[in-house]
Image (tube, helix red, strand yellow):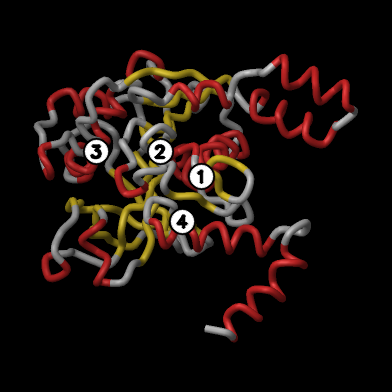
Amino acid sequence: MPHKPFKAVIPAAGLGTRFLPATKAMPKEMLPVVDKPAIQYVVEEATGAGIQDVLIIIGRNKNNIANHFDSMPELETKLREKGDHDKLAKVEHSSDLADVHMVRQGEPKGLGHAVLRARSHVGDHPFAVLLGDDLIDERDPLLEKMMSEYDKRGATVIALMEVDPSQIHLYGVAAVEPTEDDGVVKVTQLVEKPKAEDAPSNLAIIGRYVLGPDVFDILERTEPGKGGEIQLTDALEELATGGGDGGGVYGVVFRGRRYDTGDRVDYIKAIVQLAADRDDLGPALRPWFKEFAQGL
């Protein structure tokens, strides 16, 4: 019997301290990547995969996120009166993207706790969790593949990516076994932010998960782990090692274009890469980049 439609959950309650003072009054998810806030790219990824019901988990002082996905009649009227249809279309696009809902996390108690806050909204639907720090290039679809694997296997699916051992301590890391499908692995163990010498592989979890509602029961009983927070990785480890009824955990190994906007240097790189690839900006920027690089 087919399952209910997928929903999407986007945790966005973090304080964004790495970007202070910019994030003192502005949510980090609203920082622009070229000319769109980072979180809009994430919502567009969800809708591009066919998901229309999106829940954003917000914290205090993050009402700007809700405002961005709401209509703005005064602005829209002024743009319409001026005949500025291009800008009007961009403004209306963000408010027409999806059926966007908000819920507060309250205290930042970790990713697992944020996902648990979605339980009432998600109900018995399967759902995708998309972290706003990871932007996936629309030319390299990932979420659709993960949802397809969920349908095929009836199991949790996470996104994995090979990372340099020097960076492994920043991620949850998976021990895996091959499957009959190229690029898809069976996850046998998950470790949250291990030292390089303790990591079971170089396959790190990046910010995309496709989960069944059974994960909520596990999160309810998950004790605080690394950093004193409720870690989603710990709940998935229970599923991967047979502690749940969700059919285990599989990983889709992603080898496409990913932009990390959670770090200041990588955030700047993301802007440069995305702007250079655009038809309206690239032709003017690419020659300048070469000229600038030659002067360094």
Query: Neighbour class for label 1 at 10 Å: few (<14), some, many (≥20)?
Result: many
**Which numbered disc flags the more N-terminal residue, 1 or 4?**
1
Q: Name the residue under label 1.
A: 143
User: Label 3 amino acid?
Assistant: Leu
Residue closest to the eye, 228 or 121: 228
Q: First in sequence, mark 3 or 1: give its number.
A: 1
* SS assignment at label 2: strand
Residue sitting at 51 percent across and 44 percent down? 143
Give the label, 4 or 3, closer to the camera.
Answer: 4
Viewed as shown, does residue 296 lie left or right of 164? right
* Residue 37: % across, % down: 55, 40
Establish if 196 lies above or below 119. Answer: below
The answer for how far apart the CA atoms under marks 3 and 1 are is 18 Å
Alpha carbons under labels 4 and 3: distance apart: 24 Å
- Residue under numbered circle 3: 232
Q: Which label number is shown at residue 210?
A: 2
Q: Where is residue 91 in the image (x, y as percent from the top left)?
A: 70, 29
Occupied quadrant, residue 36 = top right
Q: Residue 267's mark?
A: 4
Q: In which quarter of the image is residue 249?
A: top left
Marks 1 and 2: in contact by CB < 8 Å? yes
- First in residue order: circle 4 vs circle 3: 3
